[in-house]
């Protein structure tokens, strides 16, 4: 066995993480759910979501049969909603094409919606003991530092090199311990900032440490100006209810509920166009939300509606009690605003 794998396997039982809610199971569904939730999200933020999600959808069948709205509602606040939509789509595909069972091979797992190569490998290793290499963001950092691999790990050529290296390092035995150890090392020891090299089991092998290159490895994403998008929301209130609109199923916040987006700044004219007679308009403080590829700047307009016609509830719009709206499938910035509105005297 190679020295890297041997050290990790020896280190994990005593120093790795134990007792996370998704550890110690061979249930592919639970492993899959935790892997998807942990993409781009910290362990602390995931734990509560994971428990609530499992309580409501204990297995693939329950998830496949649930309405998408409910899946999104339980995901609401976790961000990156495409993950939830893919999870739901994959559960349906598992039920329709695999009788509700997970395939065992990494290639078949990776053919399901939203399951990338690394997630497929993690499921195959932990649930089925298959030999496969993982390569999530944390593992890329560990390998780039330990083996001195330069370049941005998102570049195709660098990625190929990392995958090839990850595959050669996978040991023939103790696969689960090795894979868990690698995850633990990336999450808790070889952290992006201030890695704990003195507690690292592969420190004596580490190129970055030896050559003083820890701060420069892995290379950051090449800088590109992050574009700014602007939007204006009509926050329409009428008799203690708020008007929400379901967003298109794909794209930003796909399938979630949000405030109707105004075209132009004339709230009264926009209100009329969707069947709302507006008595008063007030500009609320603007808000900004950061996404991976752009920033969203929103100007919300609080509109007191005098009369509302049946047209207001067409085209995916709905009047909802303000407190109920805050508990429905809405993105975090919308929920924050609704919570403030619900707390108004
Ligand atoms: S020695 Fe430090 S930089 Fe190298 S792998 Fe370990 S924690 Fe990361």
Image (tube, rainbow, N blue to C red):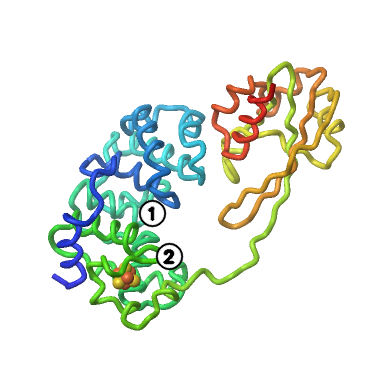
Quadrant occupied by the C terminus = top right
Image side of residue 137 versus residue 274, left or right: left
Within 10 Å of disc 2 (Cα), the crowding (few <14, some 14-19, many 20+) is: few
Q: Is residue 97 above or below residue 181?
A: above
Quarter of the image holding residue 267? top right
Image side of residue 192 versus residue 19, left or right: right
Image side of residue 201 versus residue 276, left or right: left
Asked whether residue 328 is in view, the answer is: yes
Q: Is mark 1 within 8 Å of ligand 1?
A: no
Q: Is residue 67 above or below residue 232?
A: above
Quarter of the image holding residue 343? top right
Picture mark count: 2
Percent coordinates x, y for residue 330 in the rendering = 57, 34
Within 10 Å of disc 1 (Cα), the crowding (few <14, some 14-19, many 20+) is: some
- Give the residue furthest to the bottom: 211
Percent coordinates x, y for residue 305 in the rendering = 80, 22
Residue 200 is labelled as none
Residue 116 is labelled as 1
The residue singled out by tag 2 in the image is 193
Q: Is residue 287 above or below residue 171?
A: above
* Distance Cα–Cα, label 1 vs label 2: 26 Å
Q: Secondary structure at mark 2?
A: loop
Q: Secondary structure at mark 1?
A: loop
Quadrant holding ligand 1? bottom left
The residue that appears at 31% across and 81% down in the rendered structure is 210
Of the two numbered discs 1 and 2 on the same chain, state the one appearing first in sequence. Answer: 1
Q: Is residue 205 above or below residue 188?
A: below
């Amino acid at each position: 066995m190679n020295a890297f794998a041997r050290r990790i396997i020896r280190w994990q039982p005593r120093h790795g993480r134990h007792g996370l809610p998704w550890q110690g199971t061979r249930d592919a569904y639970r492993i899959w759910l935790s892997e998807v939730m942990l993409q781009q999200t910290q362990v602390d933020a995931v734990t509560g979501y994971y428990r609530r999600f499992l309580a409501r959808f204990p297995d693939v069948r329950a998830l496949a049969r649930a309405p998408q709205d409910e899946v999104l509602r339980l995901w609401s606040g976790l961000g990156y909603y495409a993950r939830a939509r893919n999870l739901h789509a994959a559960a349906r595909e598992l039920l329709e094409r695999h009788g509700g069972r997970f395939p065992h091979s990494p290639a078949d797992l990776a053919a399901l919606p939203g399951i990338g190569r690394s997630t497929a490998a993690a499921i195959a290793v932990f649930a089925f003991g298959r030999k496969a290499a993982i390569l999530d963001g944390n593992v890329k950092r560990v390998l780039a530092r330990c083996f001195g691999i330069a370049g941005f790990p998102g570049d195709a050529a660098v990625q190929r090199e990392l995958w090839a290296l990850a595959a050669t390092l996978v040991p023939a035995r103790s696969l689960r311990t090795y894979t868990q150890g690698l995850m633990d090392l990336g999450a808790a020891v070889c952290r992006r900032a201030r890695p704990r090299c003195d507690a690292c089991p592969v420190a004596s092998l580490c190129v970055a440490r030896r050559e003083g290159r820890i701060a420069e490895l892995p290379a950051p994403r090449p800088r590109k100006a992050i574009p700014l998008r602007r939007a204006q929301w009509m926050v329409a209130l009428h008799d203690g209810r708020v008007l929400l609109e379901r967003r298109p199923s794909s794209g930003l916040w796909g399938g979630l509920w949000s405030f109707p987006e105004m075209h132009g700044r004339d709230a009264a004219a926009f209100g009329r166009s969707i069947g709302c007679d507006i008595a008063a308009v007030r500009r609320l403080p603007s808000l900004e939300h950061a996404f991976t590829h752009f920033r969203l700047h929103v100007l919300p307009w609080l509109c007191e509606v005098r009369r509302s016609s049946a047209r207001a509830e067409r085209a995916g719009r709905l009047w909802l009690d303000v407190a109920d709206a805050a508990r429905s499938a809405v993105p975090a910035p919308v929920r924050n605003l609704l919570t403030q509105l619900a707390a108004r005297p």
